[in-house]
Amino acid sequence: MNEFPVSKPPVSEKPGFLRLAKFQVYRLLKGELVTRRDVVTATAAGATGIAIERMFGFGINFSSKQVEKVVSGAVPKIEVIDARKSKQAIEKLGDYVYLTPEKLGGGTHAVDMGAGKTLAWISYWNYGDSCPISHHLAAYPSADPLKHFEFVNSTQGGDNVTIYNIPTQIKERGLLDKWGQGNHIYRVNFDGQSMNLMEDVAATTGMGLGVHTTIYPDATGFAGADGQKDICAFFDRPPEPKTSVLAAFRADWIPNDPKGNLEDNWAKGGRVRLEKLVPAKETGKFDLEGSKGNKLNWEMVPMAEYLVYTGQLPGDSPRTLTGLDAVVHHPGNKYSALILRMVSSAIIIDRKTWEPVTCLHNPEGSPDNLEIKKVSSNPDTWEVKFDDIKCVGHEAGFSPNGKIFTMMNNIKQNNMAVFDTSSPDPRKWNRFTFVKDPDWKGDFPSPFHLCFSMDGKKMFVSVLYPKPQLSGCCVVDTESWKIIAKFPNIGPDCQTMAVTYDGKYVFQIFSGFQRLSSGVFIFKQDTLEPVGYLPNFGGHHDCVIIPRKNEDLKNSRCTTL
Ligand code: CU
Ligand code: CU
């Protein structure tokens, strides 16, 4: 069974038979026929063995020789397209507005891809923010983005500007004090002419969060999170600039061995405690603006979980860190996944009841779906028990049809866990395979951000190398979960990816956010043909193509990071 790296069966299996996972039974019950093509695709990839499992599970016996024959018959060839050979893109891309934050550049700009011009921009220092690291953003749908759109943009600040070896006097000059601590959540609109700051949601609500932001699938609000504070919050979207918090949670790690060496603090297991946060009665606000509530002195940059467990990322409370830096939404608009980096897990929350339902655990060799139990009602508190933590994890997302959840396992394991999330009950969401690449070992290169093609048949993954090396991306076939193409050497710091909603193009932003080259590399969603490069100034850390309708959010900064 080794050639089919399927997760450990949760139930006993009959010897001689491969496991028939619950979702496959479900698919069989739905009357799906097992075709020869199923066998060829699944086994050619050698990845999941789904079809083979179906056959065995249904009593159709293939001798191992036959199976092997099918396997060796169609091993997919990985197409390697060296991006550096591409020229400037001259193709007409459509009237898409591409929005990108400039990270250390301190603002955000929008490019009209149809006209090849910057549409508008904003810089947050103009509003009195003395250290605006424009970090992540997500945009609400707009019927005509060239006339109007609205987005939410988190910022970092404080010591985060000092970790990139810039010989700066910014701290000595007091710019990181009160007005430079970051963790603003700027709500901004474009009115057809310029960008306007509508609201600092952190100031309105007292909830300052500086990392990922994601719009709900029905566009009625957004979630934000912050891995330095281990806090996430769910916000509404009122017509007036008076956003409120619908619910907020803090995660804490309670190690089994709190006095042992720091690496064992996580490795030897423990509990994640999730607590619902309530605002102060007098003010109706939270007291978490700026650096208030930080467990770490600066953010965990990609793969910096390692710095935490080797004591190189100090702060008030590193031992309690779970690294809750993101929330992604299932497109069914009921469940959201709280992403916990230090324990490579995702707690699934019901956004109607604000109750956590289950916890998906990603590392290979670990159980995949863990129970979450309520341990207190005052405040509402839940706990998940972990026997051990085999590796850290990071970026994650749901497929546009909601049938797949995937999350990166990083550093000790470098792969992507893939869950079947087609059951209406998240407690039945199980991991069935991993996306792997022999090149993904150690800290780098590592799978980083992801998105799906409009038809869901492909998954695009940025692959990060440390600067000044050039990062790239790869393409995964979502039937076999094998890599079918690679685009190495795109540029330094490839970050999030975006697809045009007509199904034509994939945009891979590269930021060189530490003052290196930056731009966007474009290729075709269907043929994977490279289209070329376009300039894109600033030091991006994210990107989003403004959606035109709610449906577009399924492939935007909503379901994926
Ligand atoms: Cu992140
Ligand atoms: Cu980031």
Image (spheres, grey):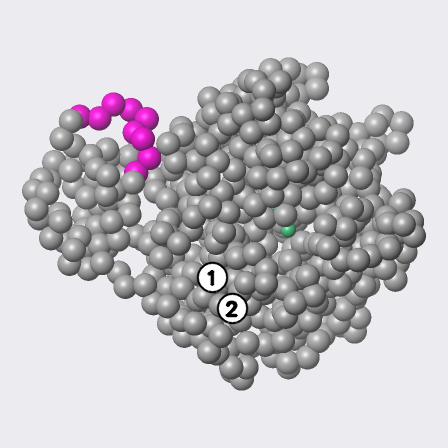
Q: Residues within 10 Å of mark 1 (few under 14, many from 20)?
A: many
Q: Amino acid at mark 1?
A: Cys
First reached walking from the N terminus: tag 1 or tag 2: 1
Looking at the image, is 255 positioned above or below residue 263? Answer: above
Question: Magenta residues, as a range?
Answer: 6-14
Percent of width and height locating residue 80 = 37, 68
Q: Measuring 14% from the left and 53% from the top, which residue is drawn there?
A: 70
Q: Measuring 17% from the left and 52% from the top, which residue is drawn there?
A: 71
Q: Secondary structure at mark 1?
A: strand
For the residue pair 127 and 514, the one nearer the viewer reads as 514
Residue 189 visible in image? no
Q: Is residue 336 magenta?
A: no
Disc marking residue 490: 2
Whether the residue under disc 2 has CB within 8 Å of ligand 2: no
Q: Measuring 60% from the left and 34% from the top, which residue is drawn there?
A: 310
For the residue pair 524 and 412, the one nearer the viewer reads as 412
Percent of width and height locating residue 128 = 90, 56
Whether the residue under disc 1 has CB within 8 Å of ligand 2: no
Q: Secondary structure at mark 2?
A: strand
Percent of width and height locating residue 122 = 79, 65
Quarter of the N terminus within the rendering: top left
Determine whether label 1 and label 2 are within 8 Å by CB. Answer: yes
The residue that disc 1 covers is 473
Q: CA distance from mark 1 to mark 2?
A: 8 Å
Q: Residues within 10 Å of mark 2 (few under 14, many from 20)?
A: many
Q: Amino acid at mark 2?
A: Ile
